[in-house]
Amino acid sequence: MRNAVGRAAAVGLVTAMLTTTAAWAASASPLLQLGKSKLRDALTSRYDTAVKAVGDASVRAAQDSRWTYAVEAKNQCGIAIGFIKSGTKDAESINKCDDFVARLSAPPPPPVSAASAPPALDCTAPAVSIFFDWNMDTPLPEGVNTISTLTQTAAQCGWKRFGVTGYTDTSGTTRYNDGLSLRRAQNVASLLSQGGIATDAMTVNGLGETQLKIETADGVREPMNRRVEITASAN
């Protein structure tokens, strides 16, 4: 088990790029009309597109929202695929998967001239999921970048309280997963602290294999359930 926390990577994203999937509902996707086999193929194709974009240095360095869309598309398409594996069509994750991939695939906006006004800061209180590899307590690289962007936005938006809650999938014992989920939350809290969030402003918990994003049987290594959820508020 690795317990050392990686240093938060510097990102060149404007603060308005922090997209929060809990704050809005995507429009109904035509994918919902597909049978499960074709739907799974379509979702897998979109997931692969998002994964490729997340790993593309030019997308990450772009001064627009494409990298954020790629991360959210990967997360939402992965959740939708997990539901399909369990025999369920989850309309919310399917809609968001399709919407974020469409946003990602759209032509990038034209460069903003120096004389243009900066974009309005989006201070919608976030609910962000940070994901982990199996049996690991340090977040995936895209999660580290999401945390960095979150800390950059926090001071400007006046967010004062943060909830940091860790979870696991259902592989492993309950006792082990309780400890693993807490270590995940503590390591994310450490990254937030490195970014300027006061330790006493955070409530850190580990809830083990409870509150699964995707319901599975015991012993299943489900990537979408291995996560830390960060919430923020102004009071």
Image (spheres, rainbow, N blue to C red):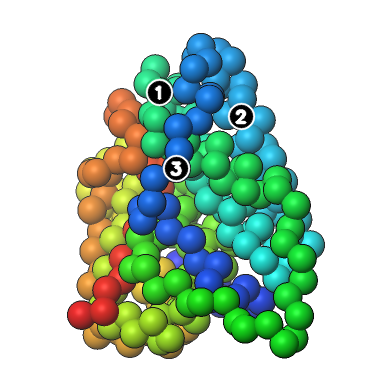
From the image, state whether disc 3 or disc 2 is nearer to you: 3
- As drawn, 87 above or below 125: above
Query: Amino acid under label 3?
Result: Ala
Is label 2 in a helix, a strand or a loop? helix
Picture quadrant where residue 3 is located: bottom left
Disc 2 marks which residue? 44
Earlier along the polypeptide chain: callout 1 or callout 2?
A: 2
Residue type of the residue flagged with mark 1:
Lys
Side (left or right) of 118 relative to 78: right
Q: Measured along the vertical axis of the image, is residue 15 above or below residue 100?
A: below
Residue type marked 2: Thr
- For label 1, the SS is loop
| Element assignment for label 3 | loop
Category of crowding for the residue at label 1, using alpha-carbon neighbours closer than 10 angstroms: few (below 14), some (14–19), many (at least 20): some
Q: Is residue 118 above or below residue 22?
A: below
First-in-chain label (3 vs 2): 3
Please name the residue shown 50% across and 46% down the image.
75
Within 10 Å of the Cα at label 2, are there few (<14), some (14-19), or many (20+) other Cα atoms? some
**Residue 26: image tag:** 3
- The residue sitting at 62% across, 43% down in the picture is 101
Q: Nearer the viewer, mark 1 or mark 2?
A: 1
Callout 3 touching callout 2 (CB < 8 Å): no
Q: Which of 56 and 154 is in front in this view?
A: 154
In the picture, the disc for residue 89 is 1
Q: Relative to 11, is 200 on the left or the right?
A: left
Compare residues 95 and 58 and report the one nearer the observer.
95
The answer for how far apart the CA atoms under marks 1 and 3 are is 15 Å
Q: Residue at position x 79%, y 62% from top?
A: 58
State the image coordinates of residue 166 (x, y, percent, origin top left): 32, 57
